[in-house]
Structure formats: structure tokens, C-alpha cells
Image (spheres, grey):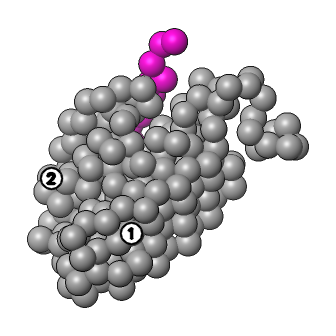
Amino acid sequence: MNNRSVEKSRSTRETEIQLGLDLDGSIQEIHTGLPFFDHILTSMAFHGRFGLRIQAQGDVDVDEHHLVEDVGIVLGDALRTAVETYGPVKRFGHAVVPMDEALSEAIVDVSGRPYLVYTAEYPQAYCGSFPAALINEFLYALVHNGKITLHAHCRYGQNSHHMAEALFKAIGMSFLQAYGPHISAEPASTKGVL
């Protein structure tokens, strides 16, 4: 089977993003200009065992928000396109990941219905210089453009970095399950369609 790969881009007055997704690949080359964001995206792809290339720049002198949100938009779009192009996937995934004192969980349904449930109480507002509040913006954009349901929970922790990193590893691992090729040509739904 050929690799299930997709190329996407987005160009606005605020951001410029080139993204390559390979659901069956293994190379992560992520450069957003936001070191912690690169770190958690790399962790997500590595533990999800998928290839992800991102070259992104934006008006981070104004705020990191536009860049983080737009990366979520483009990655979600790529995930949706991969399913539309290459056929049905297993649909569901779940992972719980510890990182030292922190424990995070992700549950995904590649359902065609976008919905995000996200809970996190970060003890520090920043992970390095990255605002932890932007994780919500990324996840919201990812879910709505990918048309997936995601329940993402930082159950507990004392270090925001550990909590966020564990969460992105859990998301990657849940994607590994959910985006695996479905054994049938029919969608994984009793309705016969998602």
C-alpha cells in the first residue's frame, strides 16, 4: 500500500504555512518559530507514528495566537483530506500517558462531527515562553477542520510542560489507533456512512 500522504498550505496576511502529512510515514520536521510548540507537535507525531512536516511563520511579534491556530487549521484539513482520499479508518482511539507527576488522556472519534471537550488546569501560565492557553486554540482549530471528536484531558500535574507534553503524546497515540486503515471498504459505522 502506498503511503497515505497529503500536502496542504495556507497563506494569509498573518501566517504562511506549508504542511506535509504522511499517516504511514515516520519523519518529523517541524519549524514554526515557537520552540515549545515544535516540541509538542513533534512528540504528537512521533508517538502517533506518522510523518509530519511543517514550515510556518507568522506575526508572532503581535501574538502567537494566529500561527498556532492556523497550524491547527491546516493539520485538521490534512487529516480530513487523508480520510477522504484514502478511505475509511478504524475511527476510534484512546490513550492515557504519564509524564513524571502528570497524567493526560486523549480519546478520539474520526466521526465527521467536530466536537472538542478539553480540560486542563495548568499551574504555570507558560511552557517555556509558550502560553499554555493557546493549546485550546490549536485543538479547537484541529478538531473543527479535521471533523473529529476529541476529548483531551490533563487529569493532573504540577508542571505545565509535563501536562501538555503528556497530552500531545496521548493525542498522537490515539491518532495511531483511530487513523489506522479500516479492514473494510465501508466506514466504521452502523449507518454505513459517517
What residue appears at the point 33 percent right and 77 percent down from the top-left corner? Answer: 133
Using a 10 Å C-alpha cutoff, classify the residue at mark 2 as few (fewer than 14 neighbours), some (14 to 19) or many (20 or more). some
Q: Judge whether residue 62 can be spotted in this image.
A: no
Q: Is residue 40 left or right of residue 190?
A: left
Name the quadrant containing residue 6.
top left
Residue under circle 2?
Answer: 33
What residue appears at the point 34 percent right and 55 percent down from the top-left corner? Answer: 169
Element carrying mark 2: loop
Q: Amino acid at mark 1?
A: Ser
Q: Is residue 111 left or right of residue 119?
A: right
From this view, report whether residue 17 is shown above or below residue 163: above
Residue reaching furthest right?
A: 191
Residue under circle 1?
Answer: 104
The span from disc 1 to disc 2 (Cα, nearest Å) is 26 Å
From this view, report whether residue 171 is shown above or below residue 61: above
Q: Amino acid at mark 2?
A: Gly
Q: Nearer the viewer, residue 53 or 170?
A: 170
Q: Give the magenta-colored segment's residue range.
A: 1-13
What residue appears at the point 18 percent right and 44 percent down from the top-left corner? Answer: 31
